[in-house]
Image: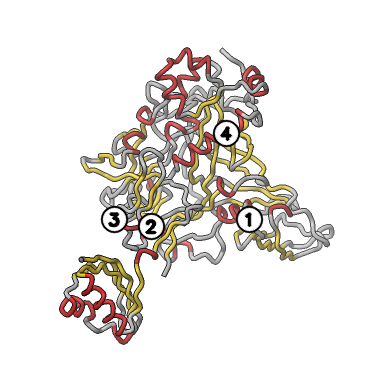
C-alpha cells in the first residue's frame, strides 16, 4: 500500500550538511516533494516534505530519520484557523498558492481546507484580523 | 405611501414586515414592485469591513490629586491618544501605533497592535494600561498617572467615526513588477490579483443611492448596539459618475457615526492589521431603510450586477493622485472570483465580509421585528447630487 504524508523535519545543526533526503530516495525508495526549506549552516534546519512510497518503506524511512535525531512532526497540525477571529472576508483566497481557501458560493463563508495547506505561512500576516495561526 | 410614524406604529403592534436587502430582490422579482412596497415596511442593509476613519473619545474622571490631560500626553497600552481637549478627555484613533512600533522600517511592517486592537480589547472588557502626563497647574497639580483601567472605569467611552460606510469603492490592482502592500491588501505584481471592498447589494448607501431616507440622526446598528448618524462622512462626494439607476460608479457618499462604546460587542468591532500599511478597525454597521414609497423600494432591489466600480492601479496612478481607470467591473463579476483586466484573467478577493454583513442585516431585522428598535425621521438630509459638497485634492501652496 502506498502512503503519502506531509511532514515537518527539524535538523540539528550537525546534520545540515548531510544529504539526508538523498538517502530517503536511494535506500528507502521514497519519492519526495519539498514544500518548504530553510537551511542555514551551523543552525537548525527546517524542511517541509511530502513523502510518498510503500507503507513499509515509509516507516523504515521515518525510523532512519529518527535515528539521526531529526525531529519529525506531521504538517497537518501546523496552520490552524481561529474560527472566532475569522471574519470570512476572503482576502486570503488569492494569496494562498494551493487554493486551500475557498469561498462557498452559497453561504459566502470562506472554507479552509487544511489538507491542501502546505504551511507556506503567506496567509498568516495577510489576514487582517490575524485569524491564521502557526503551530510547531 | 407610508410614513415613518406609521411604520413605528406597526413595530409597536408587532405587525411590521422586515426583509434584508438580499431578500427584497427575490420578493420584488416574485410579487412585483407595487405589491412588495405595500407589504414590506423596512429593508435592512449592512456592511462589515475595515474602516480607518474610526475612533473613540473618553472621559477618565479625575484621580486624586487631579491631572490635566489637555495639552499633556495620554497612552493606552502604549498607543498614543489625542489629548488636546479639557482636563479629563482624550480621543483614540484606530490607526494610532505605539511610538516604538517599527512601522515600515522593517518592510513590510506587521502592525500587530494599534488603536483598532486596543478598541477591541476595551470592548471585550480587558484591563488596559493608562499612562498620562500633565504639565501641572494650580488646579490640576498632578503630573503623572499610571493605572489599570477598563471600559467601565471611564465616565464616557463613545465610538465616533468621522468616515464609515463608503458608498462603493475601487477595485485595486497592481500594474508594477513588484508586490505592493496597500490599504487594499497585498497586491501581487503584473495584475496578479484584484481586491475590492463593498458588501455590494447589501451595502447601506448603495440601497439608498440619493440618501432619501438615510440622514442625520438616523438610528443604526453600530458595533453590536444602537448608534446614530452624526453627520455625513468626511470625503463625502455625491456628485460622481452614476449608472442610469443612480448607483455611483466610484467611491461616493460616506457617513459619520456615533454610539456608546459600552455595550458594543467585540464580534462587531475587530482590530485588524494590514501588512505594510497599518492597523485599523473592522466595523459592523446595519442601517434600516423604511419603504416609504415604490421608488425607495425599487432602490433597495439593487443587485450586485447593477453595481459597477472602476479598476484602479495602486502601484502608480493611485499613489501619485492621477485619475486612472483600467475598466469597469460589476460586483457579480468581482464575486465570481475572476475578472478580466487588460485582457488578463485576474483572481479577485474581498476585504469586506459579505457573510458577516448578512448576519448584521438579520440581527437588525430581528431587533425591528421584536420591537426593540424603532425607525427615526432624519433630522437633516445628507447632501446629495444637487448640493455643493464634494471631494477635492489639496491645491498645494508652498511656503517659501
Query: For the point 67% across and 43% down, which residue is it?
Result: B260
Q: Chain of mark 2?
A: A
Residue A92 screen position, x and y as percent: 38, 52
Label ID, residue A98: 3
Marks 3 & 1, CB-CB < 8 Å contact: no
Measured Cα–Cα span from mark 3 to mark 1:
42 Å
Q: Which residue is mark 4?
A: B364
Q: Is residue B316 above or below residue B217?
A: below
Residue A17 percent coordinates (x, y): 25, 84
Pinpoint the chain carrying mark 3. Answer: A
- Distance between mark 4 and mark 3 Cα atoms: 38 Å
Disc 4 and disc 2 on one polypeptide chain: no
Residue B201 lies, in percent from the top left, at 43, 31
Mark 1–mark 2 distance (CA, rounded to whole Å): 31 Å
Query: Along the horizontal axis of the image, is A65 left or right of B374?
Result: left
**Quadrant of image for the N terminus of chain B:** top right
Give the secondary structure at mark 2: helix
Q: Is residue A6 above or below residue B290?
A: below
For the residues labelled 1 and 4, the Cα–Cα distance comes to: 32 Å
Q: Residue at x 51, y 47 (%)?
A: B282
Which chain is indicated by disc 4? B
Helix, strand or loop at label 4? It is: helix
Mark 4 neighbour density, 10 Å: few (under 14) some (14–19) many (20 or more)? many
Where residue A123 is drawn, which disc sits there?
2
User: Which residue corresponds to mark 1?
Assistant: B81
Q: Secondary structure at mark 3?
A: loop
Could you say which disc has been placed on residue B335 in the image?
Answer: none
Secondary structure under the numbered disc 1 in the rendered image: strand
Amino acid at each position: 500500500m502506498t502512503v503519502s504524508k506531509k511532514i515537518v523535519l527539524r535538523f540539528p545543526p550537525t546534520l545540515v550538511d548531510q544529504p539526508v533526503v538523498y538517502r530517503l530516495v536511494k535506500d528507502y525508495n521514497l519519492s519526495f516533494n519539498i514544500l518548504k526549506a530553510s537551511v542555514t549552516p551551523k543552525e537548525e534546519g527546517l524542511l517541509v516534505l511530502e513523502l510518498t512510497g510503500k507503507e513499509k518503506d515509509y516507516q523504515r524511512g521515518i525510523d532512519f530519520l529518527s535515528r539521526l535525531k531529526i525531529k519529525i512532526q506531521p504538517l497537518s497540525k501546523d496552520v490552524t484557523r481561529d474560527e472566532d477571529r475569522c471574519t470570512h472576508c476572503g482576502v486570503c483566497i488569492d494569496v494562498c498558492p494551493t487554493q486551500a481557501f475557498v469561498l462557498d458560493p452559497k453561504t459566502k463563508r470562506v472554507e479552509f481546507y487544511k489538507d491542501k495547506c502546505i504551511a507556506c505561512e503567506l496567509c498568516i500576516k495577510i489576514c487582517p484580523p490575524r485569524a491564521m495561526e502557526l503551530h510547531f | 405611501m407610508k410614513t415613518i410614524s406609521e411604520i413605528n406604529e406597526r413595530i409597536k403592534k408587532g405587525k411590521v414586515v422586515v426583509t434584508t436587502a438580499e431578500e427584497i430582490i427575490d420578493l420584488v422579482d416574485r410579487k412585483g414592485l407595487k405589491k412588495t412596497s405595500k407589504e414590506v415596511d423596512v429593508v435592512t442593509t449592512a456592511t462589515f469591513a475595515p474602516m480607518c476613519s474610526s475612533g473613540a473619545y473618553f472621559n477618565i474622571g479625575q484621580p486624586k490629586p487631579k491631572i490635566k490631560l489637555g495639552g499633556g500626553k495620554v497612552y493606552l497600552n502604549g498607543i498614543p491618544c489625542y489629548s488636546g481637549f479639557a482636563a479629563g478627555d482624550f480621543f483614540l484613533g484606530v490607526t494610532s501605533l505605539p511610538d516604538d512600533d517599527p512601522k515600515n522600517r522593517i518592510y513590510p511592517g506587521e502592525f500587530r497592535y494599534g488603536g483598532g486592537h486596543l478598541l477591541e480589547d476595551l470592548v471585550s472588557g480587558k484591563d488596559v494600561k493608562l499612562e498620562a502626563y500633565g504639565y501641572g497647574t494650580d488646579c490640576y497639580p498632578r503630573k503623572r498617572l499610571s493605572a489599570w483601567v477598563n471600559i467601565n472605569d471611564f465616565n464616557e467611552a463613545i465610538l465616533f467615526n468621522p468616515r464609515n460606510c463608503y458608498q462603493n469603492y475601487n477595485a485595486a490592482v497592481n500594474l508594477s513588477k513588484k508586490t505592493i502592500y496597500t490599504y487594499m491588501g497585498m497586491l501581487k505584481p503584473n495584475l496578479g490579483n484584484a481586491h475590492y471592498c463593498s458588501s455590494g447589494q447589501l451595502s447601506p448607501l448603495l440601497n439608498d443611492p440619493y440618501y432619501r431616507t438615510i440622514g442625520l440622526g438616523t438610528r443604526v446598528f453600530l458595533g453590536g448596539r444602537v448608534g446614530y448618524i452624526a453627520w455625513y462622512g468626511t470625503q463625502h462626494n455625491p456628485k460622481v459618475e452614476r449608472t442610469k439607476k443612480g448607483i455611483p460608479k466610484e467611491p461616493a457618499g460616506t457617513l459619520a457615526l456615533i454610539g456608546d462604546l459600552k455595550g458594543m460587542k467585540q464580534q462587531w468591532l475587530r482590530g485588524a492589521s494590514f501588512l505594510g500599511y497599518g492597523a485599523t478597525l473592522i466595523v459592523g454597521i446595519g442601517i434600516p431603510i423604511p419603504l416609504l414609497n415604490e421608488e425607495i423600494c425599487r432602490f433597495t432591489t439593487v443587485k450586485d450586477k447593477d453595481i459597477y466600480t472602476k479598476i484602479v492601479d495602486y502601484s502608480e496612478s493611485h499613489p501619485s493622485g492621477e485619475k486612472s481607470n483600467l475598466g469597469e467591473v460589476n460586483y457579480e463579476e468581482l464575486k465570481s472570483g475572476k475578472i478580466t483586466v487588460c485582457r488578463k484573467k485576474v483572481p479577485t478577493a474581498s476585504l469586506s465580509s459579505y457573510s458577516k454583513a448578512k448576519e448584521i442585516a438579520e440581527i437588525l431585522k430581528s431587533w425591528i421585528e421584536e420591537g426593540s428598535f424603532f425607525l427615526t425621521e432624519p433630522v437633516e438630509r445628507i447632501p446629495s447630487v444637487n448640493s455643493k459638497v464634494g471631494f477635492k485634492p489639496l491645491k498645494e501652496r508652498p511656503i517659501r
